[in-house]
Image (tube, grey):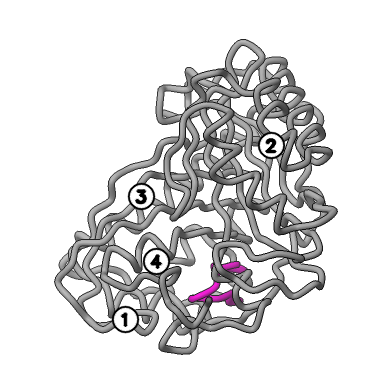
Amino acid sequence: MTETIPPNTAELQRAKSVTRAYAAALEQATPASASSVLAQHLAPDCDWRGVHPFNEQTGPDAIADVFWVPLLNAFSHMQRREDIFFAGHNEIDGFGSVWTLSMGHFMGLFDARFLNIPPTRKIAMLRYAEFHKIADGRITQSALFIDILHLMAQAGLNPLNAPQTGAQLVQPGPRTHDGLILSPQDPQEGKKTLARINNMIGSIDHANAADKPLAPQDELAIDWQDDMIWWGPTGIGATYTIDRYIEQHQGPFRRAMENRTFNGHLCRMAEGHYGGFFGWPNLTLTNKNGFMGVAGNDTRADMRVVDVYRREGDKLVENWIFIDMLHFLKMQGVDILSDMSLR
């Protein structure tokens, strides 16, 4: 499919302008003005997807009431500290729509409770990844993933019953510091990035289906540099190099999970050396042997996932991951937000 990516960089630049204007206006918003700010940039029937407990909302008023007003009440002087920004044509609908992706941290003074998480009155960094579909100069669809467990960790809370296997960090942006793609890019570079992402997805599917799959190191080496960095969500953590990624995430995950079903993506795109996707949900699987402190069970649970990638040369080298962990755990009967220890 990557052969048919439109070479229309002007359309991508227009979409970026819409998104930049939205982000700038939202940074000046207050709880009282959030709804009107959104109404200036979002279509009246904008479909919005957020992690649990925000889930799916429609229209600026609902989106503001459910997410932005509580967040702005909790975070004083909030800034969007953006590490990656790009636009692309969405492969999933045959490259017919244009989306943007923004990733980084919302930073503010954590001055009031948010989702029963106690405030610290200190700087807090809330990891986010935000996708927007742009049409006729407006945002018509949006998906906003935040790492709630990461915020809990900054407040001194660890609601999970097992230590994570990777590192707990406030995660940096790209090593190359070139993730804000504001100018037009060579469409051939985006084509290369998307092709590598798709090849990686195919490698995972092949490994899942093969009677005798490649060794994990050999499988990963097809698409990843050896010094890859996997910036995973809290609950799993970050890990570095192919060998440590296998030890600290892929191995535990594959040993725990069975009957994995890939449900596809809603958006998958690339521009220049950066690409990404999200699904709703991407995966449905069974935590058969215990994962993240949750005992093995027979429940089919969904993973809503964002992956953002940086390609260097012919291979992927950095990957930022967001998973709607609270939704995944709640489907298995673990409701983090109702835990009375957070109140």
Q: CA distance from mark 3 to mark 2?
A: 22 Å
Residue marked by disc 1: 294
Which residue is nearer to you in this view: 236 or 5?
Answer: 236
Name which residue lies at 15% across and 67% down: 211
Q: Tag 2: Cα neighbours inside 10 Å, few (<14), some, or many (≥20)?
A: many
Q: Which mark is residue 282?
A: 3
Q: Amino acid at mark 3?
A: Asn
Q: Amino acid at mark 2?
A: Phe
Residue marked by disc 4: 219
Give the SS element for disc 3.
Answer: loop
Mark 2 or mark 1: which comes first in sequence?
A: 2
Q: Count of labels shown?
A: 4
Q: CA distance from mark 2 to mark 4?
A: 28 Å
Q: Which residues are magenta?
A: 228-240
Mark 2 or mark 4: which comes first in sequence?
A: 2
Which residue is nearer to you in this view: 254 or 100?
Answer: 100
